[in-house]
Structures are given as structure tokens and as C-alpha cells.
Image (spheres, grey):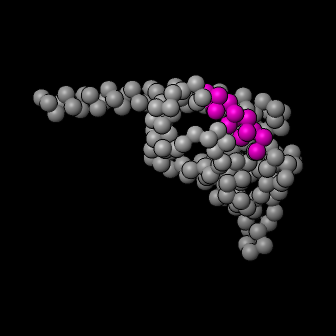
Amino acid sequence: MKEHDDLQAQGADLSAVVTAVLTGSRLLVAVAVRSLGAVADRVTLPQFRMLVVLAGHGETKLVTMAELLGVNSSTAMRMADRLVAAGLIVREVNPHNRRESLMRLTDEGRRIVDEVTARRREEIGAIVARMSDRQRRALISAMNAFNEAGGEPPVNVPNPLGWSAV
């Protein structure tokens, strides 16, 4: 009977966690969309994700990009075509394998990634600033565990707000 109660409690805990993460993801998507406001006429959210991946990975093969974005190669190709036309990425034939296409950010593409990321960081910072120190420490621990479980590598960025990651 105790084992059944423990499993039931774990199920309730899991449900509470999933609900909290879904709610948090809704907030983060809203922040992401608002942060794209100034460049929304130039890039969509999926296209911005491609720019972010390029910013993190550097020059990338089209096939690899499709895998990283979880889309098929033709979808990645169409996204890349639009970003090339907008002057945000450069796509060239791989000199080591002419059947492959390599992509990299232009200076303007990098500027957009930096600008949108700064807006996002500012808005998230304002939200987190309304939390207590204890809540922030708990959030750091929980988000690090969540990101690790999801296979998302940590972002190496400066800590301009001076908060400790303890």
C-alpha cells in the first residue's frame, strides 16, 4: 500500500512540475516573441532560431543545421534562402565537398542575434529581479537540471546583473 501511495505522490509531483514548466514556457515564448518585435519584419521566430544556432556553432553544413533545428533539409534550405535574401547569412559550397552547402552569419545577422538576445535578457532580468534571492537560487538549480535533461548546452554569457549562480 505504501508503494502505491509513493507512486501516486510521484505522479502528482510530476504533474505539478509539468504544469509549472508549461506555464513557464508560455511566459518565455511571450518574452521571445516580444524580443523579436524590432526585427519581426525581417525574421520569423524559426528563422531567428537558425541565426542563433549559427551564432553558437559557427559555419555549419545545411544537413547539420536541419538536424539541430529538428526539420528536414528542404525546410532548412528554404529558411536559409530567405535569410540569404535578407543579407543575414551567407551560404556557400563546401570547398572540401562540393555536394555540401555551408552557412555562416553575416555581420548584420550577428547584430540581430545580439540585439534580440539583449532585449530578451533585459526582460528576463526584470522578471527575475522580482524574485527573492532564495527563489533565484532555486530557479538556477531547477533550470540547470532541466536544460541538462533536455540536452541544451549552457550559454556562456557575462553576468551583468551580478547575481551569483550558487
For image coordinates 36% across by 31% down, the residue present is: 14
| Count of number-bearing discs | 0
Q: Quick check: 141 left or right of 39? A: left
Q: Position of residue 127 (x, y in %)?
A: 61, 27
Eyeballing the image, is 110 above or below 94?
above
Eyeballing the image, is 75 above or below 101?
above
Quarter residue 82 falls in: top right
**Could you tell me if residue 39 is visible in this image?**
yes
For image coordinates 45% across by 38% down, the residue present is: 142
- Per the picture, the main secondary structure of the magenta-coloured stretch is helix
Instruction: Kindly give the residue lying farthest to the left in the view shown.
Output: 1
Instruction: Kindly give the residue lying farthest to the bottom in the view shown.
Output: 96
Q: Quick check: 69 left or right of 93? A: left
The foreground one among 153 and 81 is 153
Q: Position of residue 69 (x, y in %)?
A: 63, 48
Eyeballing the image, is 160 above or below 36?
below
Eyeballing the image, is 77 above or below 119?
below
Q: Is residue 59 magenta?
A: no
For image coordinates 25% across by 28% down, the residue present is: 8
Q: Which quarter of the image is occupied by the N terminus?
A: top left
The foreground one among 141 and 130 is 130
Q: Position of residue 50 (x, y in %)?
A: 70, 47
Q: Magenta span covers which residues?
A: 114-127
Q: Is residue 118 magenta?
A: yes
Q: Position of residue 39 (x, y in %)?
A: 81, 35
**Could you tell me if residue 84 is visible in this image?**
no
Q: Quick check: 37 left or right of 16? A: right
For image coordinates 46% across by 41% down, the residue present is: 141
